Image (cartoon, helix red, strand yellow):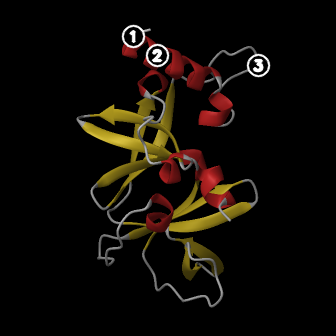
Amino acid sequence: MSKQSKKQIKKKQVLEAGVELIPDLYEEGGKPKKSKLQFISFVLGNEWYGVEISKIKDVSALSTITYLPCAPLHIAGIVNLRGNIVSVTDLRKLLGLSPVPTTKESHILVIQAGEFETTIVVDRTPKAMEIELSKIDPPLETLDPSRAEYIVGVCKLKNIFFAILNVEKILAFK
């Protein structure tokens, strides 16, 4: 079987199992509910990422992160966001990226799945975008396994590759 055929089969499997890619993407019987999805895109280091917009509760300028003793290593601390105390997940640690200092362009995104929520710090101002479902491919098989579980798909728009994050897995990290 050719490399292209394997990729097409894998993409079809991912799209048919849309519940794994993005929950509630398909109706019963396999028909897509939507042809396009909306995402918030952002940068960590030199890499672009996206989160489905329905998983974003809030976007805010970066505020002071307070250290939280005895927290797991992937928890950078907590922030007070409009009177709510929310944990800050260090996405760089989860994805194996090098730490960098925050800048005035850094923002926090409050992500949620079900009753769970956390914030993630991003390097540049997040932007909304719309992606055709057909442009989303499965994650690369060569992706480091420690990162792969947090990425549900990839796409290319205007010569930029985006990794689409699995919010449920980020929130379930132990």
Of helix, strand and loop, which one carries label 1? loop
Do the residues under discs 3 and 2 have CB atoms within 8 angstroms? no
Q: Amino acid at mark 2?
A: Lys
Disc number for residue 28:
3
Residue 111: x and y in percent read 58, 59
Question: Which residue is denoted by mark 2 in the rendering?
Answer: 6
* Contact (Cβ within 8 Å) of mark 2 with mark 1: yes
**Residue 141 against residue 39 in the figure, above or below:** above
Total marks in image: 3
At label 1, which amino acid type do we have? Ser
Q: Can you tell which quarter of the image residue 16 is in?
A: top right
Q: Nearer the viewer, mark 3 or mark 2?
A: 2
Pick the quarter of the image with the N terminus.
top left
Q: Is 147 left, or right, of 173 in this rendering?
A: left
Q: Who is closer to the viewer here, 149 or 125? A: 149
10 Å crowding of disc 1: few (<14), some (14-19), many (20+): few
Quadrant for the C terminus, please: bottom right
Q: Position of residue 2 (x, y in %)?
A: 39, 10
Q: Residue furthest top?
A: 1
| Residue type for callout 3 | Glu
Identify the secondary structure beneath mark 2: helix
Q: Residue at x 65, y 35 (%)?
A: 20
- In the displayed structure, 115 sits above or below 164; it is below
Marks 3/1: CA–CA distance: 31 Å
Q: Nearest the camera: 100 or 160?
A: 100
Q: Which residue is mark 1?
A: 2
Q: CA distance from mark 2 to mark 1?
A: 6 Å
Residue 25: percent from the left, percent from the top? 64, 29
Question: Residue at (43%, 11%) from the top-left corner?
Answer: 5
Residue at 66% of width from left, 15% of height from top?
31
Is 51 on the left-hand or right-hand side of 42? right
For the residues labelled 3 and 2, the Cα–Cα distance comes to 26 Å
